[in-house]
Amino acid sequence: MAHAESPTWLVERSTSTALNGDWRHNISNEGLVVEAWGQGFIVGSLIIMACVTVANMRKGVLLHKLILLELLLAIPHGTFAFMAFDGYSWYLSSTASLLYTSYFIHNVVAWIKIRPFIFDPTGFMFSPRTATWVSRIYIGTLAATIAPMLLQIVSNFLFFNGINDLYERVRPTETTYRDPWWLFSTLALFYVLRKCYGSSVFTLIGKSPRLGILLVAMCLAMVFTLMDILATTVPGVNHGIDGINVYWKLALVFKCLTDNIMLDDFKTELKKLGGVNGLTSLGEDEQHSPGRDRQAGRVPYGVDCRAVQRVETSTSESTVAEKAQETGGAREVEQISFQEMLSGPRSQPRATPGELMDVGGLA
């Protein structure tokens, strides 16, 4: 009995001849499984994140729309491993162009999220003049990456359609126009947490595990980005799986998770977490005691974190003086009251003869 032929849109696990752009040429079953797993991981993860984003996004918020667009553009490039139709290399290259667009949007989102800290009125991170230059450099250099990304997109089409191997020479440089900007935003957030919260950040994580997930996702994104760099620049690092690079896929998912787990900018999200800990949340007018906030290790927004130690020192000294004064006053009151209980109210001082004569003269 003859076996039924597999549908033409499914991948055959072994191919004897390769079409132009067939990435499966000379690939082992192990490599094919790793590639299929990695792409399935991308699609499944990003679809779930997109659903969560839609469920939590607010109408009219540009940042939320950009995050959703970032996720949707990255999903199609996780499907080409399951295609086997003629000319699917054009599909592969087209989805790769959407992926590079998603990378660009991710860096835009990273800037929007960290921008409120860069331009903080207290000059916590940068002075107003320096913050302006940081903004110009960030946006200017990010805009300059459009040209090399277009070159990368063209090299994808040329390589996977069997025209030339420019892609192999361009791919190792991809990280230079893909990663520095979101890495800057990530390290800036770590600086803010380290400077303003210190060890109390663990208290925030305990009250809101989302912050912990955000920090872990950022660390994993950096680790897998480093592995991707090594796999594309150091010979032999990626040889064990026949050149199939799964590291960029893992980095992509965790980078998207850093945007998805907290939709608003970092300052707004930390204000929300601060509201749990006694800080004023966004849109609230509730006033909290600075003394209680300092005792809990919290720093109110709008206060220069560098001055907190000085404020705490002066406040503690004044508090001690006030307590001593209050204690001394209380003891004096207690002493007077005790004397009055024993001898009655104090008598008024007697008038002098001169005062009596003046009074008599007036009378």
Image (cartoon, grey):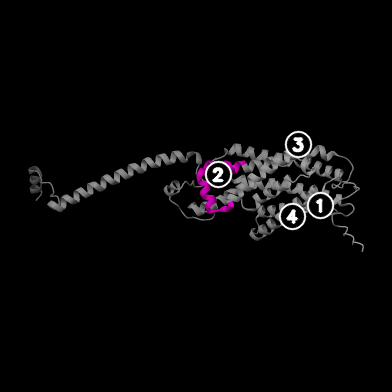
Element marked by disc 3: helix
281 and 232: which is toward the camera? 232
Could you say where residue 130 lies in the image, as x and y percent from the top left? 60, 36
The amino acid sitting under disc 3 is: Thr
Could you say where residue 56 lies in the image, as x and y percent from the top left? 63, 59
Q: Is residue 141 magenta?
A: no
Q: Which residue is mark 1?
A: 81
**Sequence order check: which comes first, mark 3 or mark 4?**
4
Q: Which residue is mark 4?
A: 43
Cα separation between marks 1 and 4: 12 Å
**Sequence order check: which comes first, mark 3 or mark 2?**
2
Q: Which residue is mark 3?
A: 233
Q: Which residue is mark 2?
A: 193
332 and 273: which is toward the camera? 273
The N terminus appears in which quarter of the rendering?
Answer: bottom right
Cα separation between marks 3 and 2: 33 Å
Could you say where residue 41 lies in the image, as x and y percent from the top left? 73, 53
Element marked by disc 1: helix
16 and 147: which is toward the camera? 16
> Residue visible at 89% across and 51% down?
87
In the image, residue 166 sits, relative to residue 6, either above or below, namely: above
Cα separation between marks 4 and 2: 32 Å
The amino acid sitting under disc 4 is: Val
Q: Main secondary structure of the magenta part?
A: helix
Q: Which mark is residue 342?
A: none
For residue 183, which quarter of the picture?
Answer: top right
Could you say where residue 117 lies in the image, as x and y percent from the top left? 58, 44
Q: Residue furthest bottom?
A: 1
The amino acid sitting under disc 2 is: Leu
Mark 3 vs mark 2, foreground winner is 3
Mark 2 vs mark 1, foreground winner is 1
